[in-house]
Amino acid sequence: MEAFSHLLEQLYYTAGTKAKAQLIADYIANTPDPDRGWAIAAMAGTLRFDFFKRNTVKKLITERTDPALFAMSYDYVGEVSETVAHLWPDNEPVSPLPSLGSIVETFASISKQRVSETLADYLTMMTPSQRWALLKLGTRGLRIGVSARSIKHILADYGNKDIKDIETLWHAVSPPYTELLQWLEGKASKPNIDDVVTFHPVMLSHPIEEKDIDAFAPNTWQIENKYDGIRVQLSLNTQKAAPEKALYSRTGDDISHSFPDLLSDMSGHMVLDGELLVIHNQATDNALPNVDTFNALQQRLNKKKPSKALMQSSPVGLIVYDALMLEGKSITQMPLKARREKLANYLSANPHPQLFLSDVLDADSPQDLRALHSSVCENRAVEGLMIKRLDSVYVPGRPKGQWFKWKRDPLLVDAVMMYAQRGHGKRSSFYSDYTFGAWEGEQLLPIGKAYSGFTDEELKKLDNWVRRHAVGRFGPVREVEKALVLEVAFDAVHPSNRHKSGVALRFPRIHRIRWDKPANEADTLDTVKSLIER
């Protein structure tokens, strides 16, 4: 645990990407299994369980210190783990500390009743920096400026392998990555994942720019609707002795349990890329999907075990726009035009009532493309266009100039700032998270929260305004004078029973700060509700 804590401390105070990569590579080279594998998982965000909850941490510290002292310290520091690490009153040093691997195994195996006691024992034997490392590890809140993509590159460089090999293996292997690391060091053969049903990293698009639209030429691009659902990957191998089926989100989370009605009678050996939507009709010859809005799909998301009634009222289907594997053979190195032809032939020969092949749209000039975009955006189930090079091979990541997305313009409302809260990490000294509301008569009701969309310079001005106009305090939250109007951009509004206003915004962000606009001229709740997709 000492080595892991020291690594995190070094990474936290190191700015350069190359310098961070070298620190991690040195740690991997000099740390035994399974510690180094668990450290990789912590940094890459692939730990699949919490050791303990944040509330457990807060309960432990408030039992041992004055709650008012903790509240003031937290307000000053702006981050729970760092506050507790320094404020923890008990210290009985142990040397050497238990290994990282043994700590992970302990929390993975003990009963819930023993978590608090075990955590307290560990915190007591550690220094503040070691406590911080443990608390960040245990709540999966580690942010050290190293992304999962960076970790993969570091591993590829460490083993002198192609990054594509790491990408292909990544979701088929699991922490503590012993077999993977031994292969990288030439001590074992490459992990065999031939028959494994796993997530394959997806190919992503870039937002389209005017110059890209102006350069559009026919017979070079495939144009499709960009449906307003969630991107998923359907991975199947029902032809082996122990059949497997899985539905993954675009980030590789297994969401199969939420959509058993989609997977129940799927068969084959394939990996399909598509959009999951609520679709009220079945795929038959020449049938166009009757797609519902994202609000309908929202009812199905994050349901661990959807009811039969919910599955009947909101049936899901998949609009398929690409294939990575068909009939057990990878086709990612084929150009899109060839992949599309194979996919169309496969779905024609193997129809399924919940699989729809995406429509290909036509445009012959930049002017046609702009007109097409305006036309498709009139359909609230569609959020724009996808424009893909016909000669593009399927590669993980976001290659330049291959795929573009052209989303509809965001919806906008003028809302009034009601509360502000300090951010995390580099923003822990600034009030950067803003709750805003709309008018219902003389009362403001909160409709959302945003913490992006403004520049660093605007953040400084907002932080200064919050400090000068605070009228109340609720722990780390400041209530502010109802005087500042924020122009908020968002993708959609949907009804919500969780909020007093009865609405929730999808992907809200600050579009503009209306220093010039009086608060009483901000939008009403009725105006916001009028934007709900019907």
Image (cartoon, grey):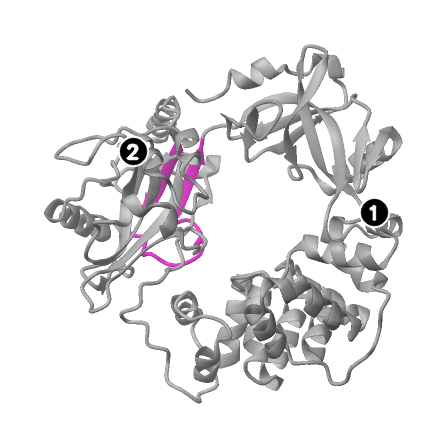
Amino acid type, mark 2: Gln
Please tell me whether residue 92 is drawn above or below residue 278 in the rendered image.
below
Give the crowd class for mark 1: few <14, some 14-19, many >=20 residues within 10 Å.
some
Quadrant into which the N terminus falls: bottom right
Secondary structure type for disc 1? helix
Of residues 313 and 505, which is closer to you in this image? Answer: 313
Stretch of the chain drawn in magenta: 383-407
In the rendered structure, the answer to whether residue 447 lies left or right of residue 92 reads left
Please tell me whether residue 181 is drawn above or below residue 230 in the rendered image.
below
Amino acid type, mark 1: Asp
Please give the label number shown on residue 75: 1
Instruction: Work out whether mark 1 precedes mark 2 in sequence or the reverse, and give the earlier one.
Output: 1
Question: Which image quadrant is residue 312 in?
Answer: top left
Instruction: Return the residue at label 2.
Output: 312
Please give the label number shown on residue 124: none
Where does residue 338 sit, x and y in percent of width and height?
21, 52
Where does residue 295 sit, x and y in percent of width and height?
43, 29
Q: CA distance from mark 1 to mark 2?
A: 48 Å
Q: Residue at x 42, y 66 (%)?
A: 167
- Which residue is most to the front? 113
Q: Residue at x 43, y 47 (%)?
A: 304
